[in-house]
Image (cartoon, rainbow, N blue to C red):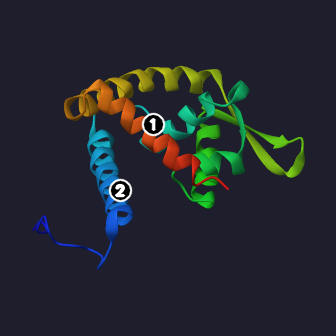
Amino acid sequence: MSPSPRAETTVGAGPAVEAWEALLRSQVALWRLLEADDVWEPITPREYDVLHTLGRCPDGRARIRDLHREVLLSQPSLSRLVERMAEAGLVAREPDPADGRGTVVVLTETGDRLRRRVGARHAESIRRTVGVALDEREQQALRLLCDKLRAGTRT
């Protein structure tokens, strides 16, 4: 059952709430489609998220608490995932030199090769999915809006 196009989910929601709901529902629909795509083997989308995030970090390294800010996992789930990834040789765990209680996660050569291989397939899947819905100008506008929205949430 789909809601009526005029149905309001929140009384007096206004444009900010409507924009949020549109963004959230679009993200969920896109993620479900991309997650179901046959590009992930031999890792999971969550493992790829960690590898991709580390690949964007200086020297492929990040404190686990900084990694947590970027991935879509709770801190305990991320810690368990990183532990499994370390056992598989995709990442290494090192003590944080600035804080002996913390952990630095390091992208290994094996993890980086896998990140690149899966990432190329994932990027092609994104191009096919997003490119059908939005032209290049709209894609650029969406990125600018998302960057602006994210910048406004950083504290």
**Quadrant the C terminus occupies:** bottom right
Could you say which is closer to the camera, residue 67 or residue 17? 17
Could you say which is closer to the camera, residue 5 or residue 129? 5
Question: Does residue 44 appear in this view?
Answer: no
Q: Residue at x 32, y 23 (%)?
A: 124
Identified by mark 1, the residue type is: Leu
Question: Does residue 32 appear in this view?
Answer: yes
Q: Position of residue 23 (x, y in %)?
A: 34, 53
Q: Position of residue 130 (x, y in %)?
A: 28, 33
Q: Quadrant of residue 122?
A: top left
Q: Which is more foreground, mark 2 or mark 1?
A: 1
Identified by mark 2, the residue type is: Leu
The disc at residue 144 is 1
> Which residue was labeled with disc 2?
24
Callout 2 environment at 10 Å: few (<14), some (14 to 19), or many (20+)? few
Q: Residue at x 36, y 65 (%)?
A: 17
Q: Quadrant of residue 123?
A: top left
Find the distance from the CA under tag 2 to the CA under tag 1.
Answer: 17 Å
Side of 148 relative to 125 (left or right): right
Q: Residue at x 31, y 39 (%)?
A: 34
Side of 71 relative to 97 (left or right): left
Mark positioned earlier in the residue sequence (2 or 1): 2
Q: Position of residue 49 (x, y in %)?
A: 50, 39
Q: Position of residue 138 (x, y in %)?
A: 30, 32
Q: Secondary structure at mark 2?
A: helix
Side of 67 relative to 28 (left or right): right
